Amino acid sequence: MAKLATLAAIFAAFLLMSHVVEAHWTTITSVEIDEEGPRRGGSCHEQFQRQDLDRCEQLFEDIARGGRGASAKERMESSESLRPCCEQLRQVQEGCRCEGIKWIVREQQGEYRGEGSHEVVRSARRLPLTCGVGPQPCEIRAAWY
């Protein structure tokens, strides 16, 4: 009986120790903090999310639609969307303007057919110069040529 009492005491001690160890169990959670924060103006993609370039989209649609006897340059210059498009481009960070123009051309490439698609790409390349917002044309390659 004494052995049984000793065995019960040892068992109780182990049981008590297991609860003490379990009570001090620690969970470590790591959190990654971005110390740098967002860059000034954010990424180009973020800018396009904030700044709509819908008037530039309309400008390219006007150019693609064509017109009898009017060149793409004449259609661009006579489009009611040119001035608002230029204003929208001025709101975009300089390093992102050509990316925005490329994005529009890529998004709408299926809508342009034949010579209209070539004229849209040529006009898109010249748009920063036409609007006076860039020192050089955009480099845009059309995948559907």
Image: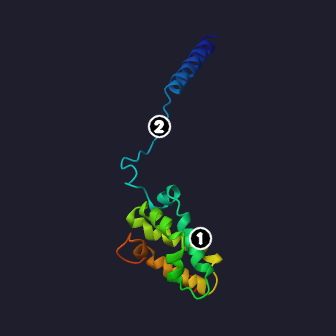
Residue 107: give its label.
1
Q: Residue at x 59, y 20 (%)?
A: 11
Few, some or many residues within 10 Å of mark 1 (<14, 14–19, 20+): few
Picture layout, residue 47 above or below residue 106: above
Q: Position of residue 93 (x, y in %)?
A: 40, 62
Q: Residue at x 56, y 69 (%)?
A: 57
- Residue designated by label 2: 28
Q: Residue at x 37, y 72 (%)?
A: 134
Circle 2: residue type: Ile
Q: Is the N terminus in the top left, top right, bottom left or bottom right quadrant?
A: top right
Q: Position of residue 99 (x, y in %)?
A: 46, 69
Mark 2 or 1 closer to N-term? Answer: 2
Is residue 2 visible in this depiction of the protein?
yes
Q: Position of residue 83 (x, y in %)?
A: 48, 67
- For the residue pair 113 and 6, the one nearer the viewer reads as 113
Is residue 142 visible in this depiction of the protein?
no
Q: Quadrant of residue 64?
A: bottom right
Circle 2 SS class? loop
Picture layout, residue 133 above or below residue 68: above
Side (left or right) of 9 relative to 30: right
Side (left or right) of 94 relative to 22: left
Circle 1 SS class? helix
The answer to the question of whether label 2 and label 1 lie on touching residues, with beta carbons closer than 8 A, is no
